[in-house]
Amino acid sequence: EMDEIVIDAKSKMAGASVASTAARSKHGVLVIAAKKLDGTMVFNPGADYIFCEQDTVIVMGDTEDIQKFRSECEVSPKA
């Protein structure tokens, strides 16, 4: 499944690197792209990419893995 995660100020992802979120190694979730607030897309962001508040992160993985990733990173559930 693919999903979009919008990073808000309360999320642990704001200011964190792709590597520090352990998206793939711990959660089995692949970060496909990040869409910046200005619409710029960063495809296949590297491990050192820093997520910013209001980034929309496009991820791929099993539904359950994505939900656990959202929960651990304190990202609001999908509306």
Image: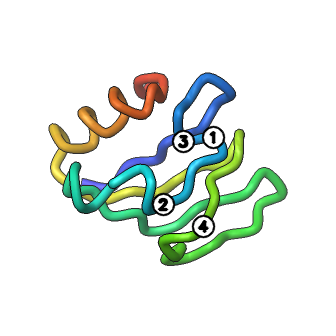
Quarter location, residue 70: top left
> Which is nearer the N-term, disc 2 or disc 3?
3
How far is the residue under mark 2 from the one under mark 1?
A: 11 Å
Residue that mark 1 sits on: 14
What is the x, y in percent for residue 9? 68, 27
Q: Amino acid at mark 3?
A: Met
Task: Name the residue beneath numbered marker 3.
Answer: 13
Q: Are marks 1 and 3 in contact (CB under 8 Å)?
A: yes
Mark 3 vs 4: CB contact within 8 A? no
Tell me which numbered mark, 1 or 4, is placed earlier along the sequence.
1
Q: Amino acid at mark 4?
A: Tyr
> Which residue is pictured at 54% across the width and 73% down the height?
45
Q: Is residue 11 above or below residue 17?
A: above
Q: Amino acid at mark 1?
A: Ala
Q: Are marks 2 and 4 in contact (CB under 8 Å)?
A: yes
Q: In terms of depth relative to the viewer, which is nearer, 14 or 7?
A: 14
The residue beneath circle 4 is 49
Q: Is residue 38 left or right of residue 13?
A: right
In the drawing, what numbered circle is on residue 18? 2
Pointers 1 and 4 in contact (C-beta within 8 Å): no
Q: Pick whichever, 55 or 39, lies toward us.
A: 55
Looking at the image, which residue is at 38% across and 49% down? 3
Kind of residue sitting beneath label 2: Val
Is disc 2 in contact with disc 3, using a CB cutoff of under 8 Å?
no
- Give the secondary structure at mark 3: loop
